[in-house]
Image (cartoon, grey):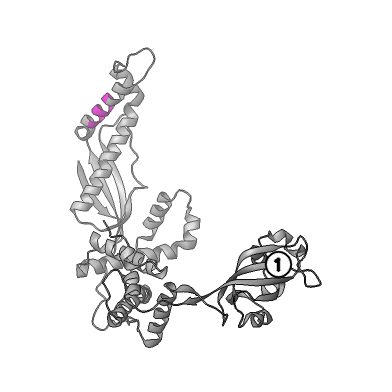
């Protein structure tokens, strides 16, 4: 096979592959023998179909397939060997490849390629962007500490109500005269979180109460949401409007939420056994976590600003007509008309990919598999911590 290249213009070229019979004869013969071995034709045993019949049935299609396979592989090898930077994939040349497979034994198969433009070096010491560095100040430290303490807090039984405790008790539906309604609701062990009560008068009625006290509640003003009220009373929302608004609530227990103490037990829960041993190292770890959590966002902002600057200041010449044909070919449902409407977005994407790869090549940037794993792990780690899952419970990458 002989491969030649001829420029159409500065942005595209035609690669021609000359194929003679000696290039394809052996592979075509082998392929036809495979057809013969597998052919299931009435009147012939498997593997005994005459080769002439196989040739007549499959010869042309096999020849076409193998010639184009050889040509395509030759073009790919040529591009690789000559280190030609291209965009997309080689396309069958629209003004060539008028081949006669009935009579010819020699063929010239042509492909069009689009060159990837060269990127002039635009990075120098005058080009500067600001990287935002997260500041772990006292306010952020206090917010994070409160969040962790609340995450690992507990409810403790207390004797009286001071603010927004959680209560257990019994709801009893009342008649108009204030007595228990005959056949009405009597819901035991009902949980009431005072922080969700919407009626200030009801909250005031609970203030200072102790276990065993009874409080009268207007359920509709205290819990305006029908579904919430129905859940508290153990009924379905469909019947909630038929139930009295007035209930008594007998307090059976009072529990107050207490944030976790900053002690070794909490340190171990958050960061693993013995990783943090005092408050100083605890705050150091929090600083590390805070910065690592926001660092990706800072990187994203820097990346976005740099990419916007590149889009505005670094212009590349692209083989537009070639790229449009290539995009339509690889997207069956896309037409040239539809492509024209969004082509500027494709151009921006091509420009950025070319420029990014040129930067990688210039500075010898290579992303290793270990770096990919570590980045993925850091993302998962931060996500887990946001949901209160301790560091030592995150599985190691394999």
Tell which of 282 and 210 is nearer to you. 210
Tell which of 225 and 204 is nearer to you. 204
Specify the segment rendered in magenta: 27-33
Count of numbered tags: 1
**Residue 216, horizontal then vertical, whole percent:** 70, 75
Residue 351 at least partly seen: no
Tell which of 219 and 67 is nearer to you. 219
Residue drawn at (35%, 81%), measured in percent from left and top? 134
Mark 1, residue position: 172
Magenta-highlighted stretch: main secondary structure?
helix
Residue 28 belongs to magenta span: yes
User: Where, by quadrant of the figure, is residue 13 drawn?
Assistant: bottom left
User: Where, by quadrant of the figure, is residue 104 drawn?
Assistant: top left
From what the image shows, is residue 351 above or below residue 111?
below
Residue 241 belongs to magenta span: no
Residue drawn at (36%, 63%), measured in percent from left and top? 350
**Residue 314, horizontal then vertical, whole percent:** 33, 73
Q: Which residue occupies the extreme right position in the image?
A: 177
Q: Which residue occupies the extreme front position in the image?
A: 212
Residue drawn at (72%, 59%), measured in percent from left and top? 238
Quadrant holding the N terminus:
top left
């Amino acid at each position: 096979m002989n491969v030649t290249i001829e420029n159409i213009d500065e942005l595209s070229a035609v690669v021609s592959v000359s194929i003679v019979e000696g290039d394809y004869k052996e592979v075509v013969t082998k392929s036809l023998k495979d057809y013969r071995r597998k052919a299931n034709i009435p009147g012939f045993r498997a593997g005994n179909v005459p080769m002439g019949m196989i040739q007549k049935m499959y010869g042309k299609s096999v020849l076409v397939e193998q010639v184009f396979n050889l040509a395509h592989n030759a073009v790919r090898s040529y591009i690789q060997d000559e280190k030609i930077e291209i965009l997309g994939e080689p396309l069958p040349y629209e003004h060539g490849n008028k081949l006669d497979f009935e009579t010819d034994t020699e063929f010239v198969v042509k492909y069009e390629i689009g060159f990837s433009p060269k990127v002039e070096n635009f990075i120098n010491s005058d080009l500067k962007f600001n990287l935002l560095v997260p500041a772990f100040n006292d306010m952020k430290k206090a917010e994070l500490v409160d969040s962790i303490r609340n995450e690992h807090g507990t409810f403790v039984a207390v004797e009286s109500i001071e603010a927004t405790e959680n209560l257990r008790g019994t709801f009893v539906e009342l008649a108009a005269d204030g007595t228990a309604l005959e056949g009405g609701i009597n819901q035991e062990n009902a949980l009431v979180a005072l922080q969700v009560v919407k009626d200030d008068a009801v909250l005031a009625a609970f203030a200072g109460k102790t276990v065993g006290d009874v409080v009268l509640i207007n359920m509709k003003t205290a819990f305006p949401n029908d579904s919430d009220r129905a859940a508290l009373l153990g009924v379905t929302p469909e019947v909630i409007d038929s139930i009295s608004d007035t209930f008594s609530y007998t307090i059976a227990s009072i529990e107050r939420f207490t944030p976790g103490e900053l002690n070794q037990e909490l340190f171990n829960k958050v960061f693993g056994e013995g990783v943090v041993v005092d408050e100083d190292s605890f705050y150091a770890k929090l600083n590390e976590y805070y910065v690592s959590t926001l660092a990706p966002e800072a990187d994203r902002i820097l990346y976005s600003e740099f990419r916007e600057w590149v889009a505005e200041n670094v212009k590349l010449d692209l083989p537009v007509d070639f790229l449009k044909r290539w995009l339509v070919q690889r997207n069956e449902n896309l037409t040239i008309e539809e492509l024209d409407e969004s082509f500027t977005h494709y151009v921006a994407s091509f420009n950025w990919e070319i420029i990014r790869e040129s930067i990688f090549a210039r500075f010898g940037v290579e992303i290793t598999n270990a770096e990919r794993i570590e980045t993925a792990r850091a993302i998962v780690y931060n996500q887990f911590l946001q949901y209160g899952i301790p560091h030592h419970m995150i599985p190691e990458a394999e």
